[in-house]
Image (cartoon, helix red, strand yellow):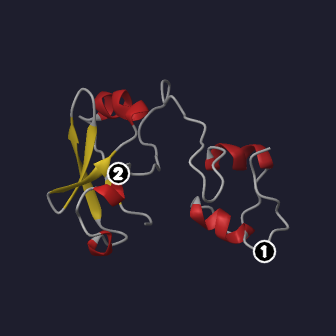
Amino acid sequence: MRLPPRKRNDFNQFLESIRIPTDTSISDFALLGYSRATLPGDNFSILHPFEHVNEPFEFVTEINFLDHNGYAIDDIKIGNEISFQYGLDSIEVKYNRHTIGYIKKVYTSLFNRIKDTNIKGVIEKK
C-alpha cells in the first residue's frame, strides 16, 4: 500500500502535508484517498476524475514548472491567492500577474469545465 507506516517518526508531518489534523482518526482507505497515494518526495499519485462532483469542493494539486519560470520562489508567500488563465491546452497559474507555473495537463478539462464558478486558488506550501 502507498502509505507511510503510522509508526514512523514523521507520520504527523505526512498528515499535515495533506491538510489532515494529526489528532484525526482516519482509516487507511480514507487516507489513501486524501493523499492520492502520493508519498512524501515522490511524484506518483492517483488522479480523481471529478466527473460527478458537485461544488463546492476542495482540490489540492502541485504547480508544474514552478522552479523553471524565472519567478523567485522566495517571493511567493504561503496563504496568498493565485489566479488562473484558461486555455484549451493548458491552465496557467498566475501570482502577482506573473505566470509561476501550470496545472497538471490531466486537469485542464476540469478547470475549463468549472472556470465560470467561484474558483479560489491559494498557495498552501512550497
Label total for image: 2
Residue at image mark 1: 9
| Residue toward you, 27 or 38 | 38
The residue located at (82%, 63%) in the rendering is: 6
Task: Tell me the amino acid under the disc marked 1.
Answer: Asn
**Which of marks 1 and 2 precedes in the sequence?**
1
The residue located at (23%, 52%) in the rendering is: 83
Asked whether, in this view, residue 51 is left or right of residue 45, the answer is left
Residue 21 makes an appearance in the image? no
Relative vertical location of residue 50 with respect to residue 7 in this rendering, above or below: above
Q: Which mark is residue 80?
A: none
The residue located at (55%, 35%) in the rendering is: 47
The residue located at (38%, 48%) in the rendering is: 64
| Residue toward you, 66 or 124 | 66
Distance (Cα) linking label 2 and label 1 = 31 Å
Q: Quadrant of the C terminus?
A: bottom left
Q: Estimate the x, y position of residue 65 in percent, counting from the top left.
A: 35, 51
Asked whether, in this view, residue 31 is left or right of residue 8, the answer is left
The 10 Å Cα crowd at callout 2, few under 14, some 14 to 19, many 20 or more, is: few
